Amino acid sequence: MSDRKLDLVIIGGGPAGLAAAAAASEAGVKDLLVIERDRKLGGILNQCIHNGFGLHTFKEELTGPEYADRYIKKTQALGVPFLTDTMVVDLSWDQETGAKFVTAMNKESGLFVIEAKAVILAMGCRERARGALNIPGYRPAGIYSAGTAQYYVNIEGRMPGKEVVILGSGDIGLIMARRMTLEGAKVKVVAELMPYSGGLKRNIVQCLNDFDIPLKLSHTLVDIKGKKRVEGVTIAQVDENRKPIPGTEEYYSCDTLLLSCGLIPENELSLMLGVEMSPVTGGALVNESLETSIPGVYACGNVLHVHDLVDYVSGEADTAGRNAAAFLQGAQTQNDTNVKKETEIKIRTVDGVRYSVPATVRPEHMSDMLTVRFRVGNEYRDKVLAVYFEDEPLMKLPKRIMAPGEMEQIILQKKKLEELAEKALAAGVSAPQITIRVEEKA
């Protein structure tokens, strides 16, 4: 039993949810609702007061709040309704009717259930828990995730500490190295377990190099000193198996340790729903329409896979919003009996390529061109990014450098894929594949 029925529910009011809502509304969906657990729309962008956002989407450089405000105003102008301070606590669906049930709660309405024809998952991502890092030593005051420190400084206006060591070189950690420095703190070092940084190259330059903050690759934390408050930490170099090398220890006195050890999609609701998930990204497996394994359920933004640029989040969410509208207006889904299974092409990622979004492609549902985004699993220099349809080369792109911290992309042409799929089926290939791999230069 539901308290309310809607065509579309969008879970998450950050950049992905807002862009998806705007696109769905512009495509004709009026019976929709955005649900956001925070007090205001905008998501994590509200605490990202640095600039660098919007260069692709708006052709100008904006801060996080400015970027979010553009989409907030757009959805308001379109009349998109939203609920803030509202937590979605359960998500389920009826396989017979296709109805989705969104259970949420807030202080005004208590617990309530919305029955929806379609749902867009746009819950974003969260930082990895420090408990999973197995850092030896005590757990005194002064240990924060980089995102928590960012919230304290940018939203609450208070400093976590004055002498700082940062473990991990994710983008939030790099940005906080600069932010803490600008606020008068001394950032002693950024230690990174991997032999490459997890952040954008531009952030390494602008946030570390410009402030003479050392970045120590292939290093990890081996001890924390201090019982009531952090007094110092010891880092050490690691070998190829990521084990500390005895004799390489370095001690840094500090009162604050920031952990910037990666982001993971916020997918508890997706798991409740029974969506098929990627073991690599921790997000849903989707097709070219960003539809999950459950018809009428779409995923976009960092809940799908962690992006490097918010502009790509918004572009992806726009696609999800438009395709959700098409679903509601009667277009086919991947589970329709009218869609030939043999026309579904799997994208296989091997030899240095970790995953792709989307994971499958149906050429008949593509627009003229489809952007496929992915990340590599190591740092590569002077290699070739090769794409094949079965054994036929589609493209070979020389790459001066590829790194895990920055997404790569290829563009697939609908007409070409349709021709190749028809040729493969005629040859008796029932499940054609596209393969993306890293190769040596010829």
Image (cartoon, grey):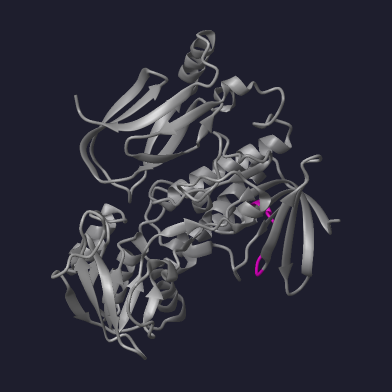
Using residue 391 as the reference point, say whether residue 208 is left or right of it: left
Which residue extends farthest bottom? Answer: 228
Residue 366: percent from left, percent from top = 55, 27
Using residue 109 as the reference point, say whether residue 363 is left or right of it: left
Residue 350: percent from left, percent from top = 37, 34
> Residue 316, relative to residue 226: is it above or below?
above
> Residue 280, relative to residue 295: is it above or below?
below
**Residue 84 is covered by the magenta coloring:** yes
Query: Does the magenta stretch mainly form a helix, a strand or a loop?
Result: loop
Determine the residue positioned at 79% across, 59% down: 113
Q: What stretch is highlighted in magenta?
A: 78-85
Determine the residue positioned at 70% across, 55% down: 91
Counting every numbered tag in the picture gives 0
Q: Nearer the viewer, residue 287 or 328?
A: 287
**Is residue 82 visible to the viewer in this orientation of the structure?**
no
> Residue 423, relative to residue 104: is it above or below?
above
**Is residue 296 visible to the viewer in this orientation of the structure?**
yes
**Residue 219 is covered by the magenta coloring:** no
**Quadrant that contains the C terminus:** top left
Using residue 365 as the reference point, say whether residue 49 is left or right of it: left
Residue 260: percent from left, percent from top = 36, 66
